[in-house]
Image (cartoon, grey):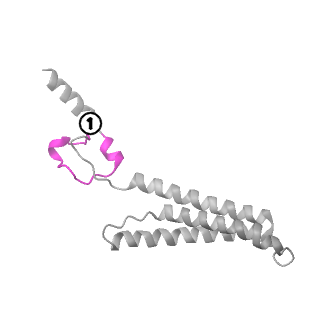
Amino acid sequence: MSNFLFDLFSNFALLAIVLIVCHLCNRLIPGATLNGAYISVGLAAAALLLGAVLTFLVFADAQNRYDKFSAPAAFFARTIAYALAAIAALTWCYVGRLLRPTWTDTRSTLVPGGADEVQPGVLTAGPIATTRISIDRIFKSVIAEES
């Protein structure tokens, strides 16, 4: 169990380091669009592949020296730790995308205050703010069109 917790902790530490480095690169390098979550999932997949090779090919040939590392149970514990870190990374990416401010074209988006008050290309507060519509404003515009 302690090996699993160490694997999980080290995977989360690697995830945090990759996210921080990618965020800094995106801020400091113009035009960089690195996604730290995808990079950490790729690193976890590569580590899983190398772990499988080591566990079932290298350590399996030297059972007497590397008995605890060559056990399939140890490999599956590492696999679960990699999978949990990958799920956390993809969840972080998804939640970050939902909460990130987005550039919207106000000609195709209904915004509180109407399109007259907001200029095209204005930074809004994300998908939640762009979908809030005043019911009174809708009814007033429908009544104005009918008359």
Question: Where, by quadrant of the figure, is residue 144 drawn?
Answer: top left
Instruction: Specify the farthest residue to the top.
Output: 147
State left or right for residue 135 relative to residue 54. Answer: left
Give the residues drawn in magenta, as a range. 109-132
Neighbourhood count class around disc 1 (C-alpha, 10 Å): few under 14, some 14–19, many 20 upward: few
Work out whether residue 12 or residue 22 is closer to the camera in this orientation and state it: 22
Question: Where, by quadrant of the figure, is residue 75 drawn?
Answer: bottom right
Is residue 110 shown above or below 33?
A: above
The answer to whether residue 83 is magenta is no
Residue under the image location 23 percent in, 28 percent down:
139
Disc 1 is placed on an element classified as: loop
The answer to whether residue 114 is magenta is yes
Quadrant where the C terminus lies? top left
Which residue is label 1 attached to?
134
In the image, residue 95 lies at what x, y percent? Answer: 46, 54
In the image, residue 63 lies at what x, y percent? Answer: 85, 73
Instruction: Specify the farthest residue to the left.
Output: 147
Residue under the image location 81 percent in, 76 percent down:
66
Residue under the image location 83 percent in, 75 percent down:
62
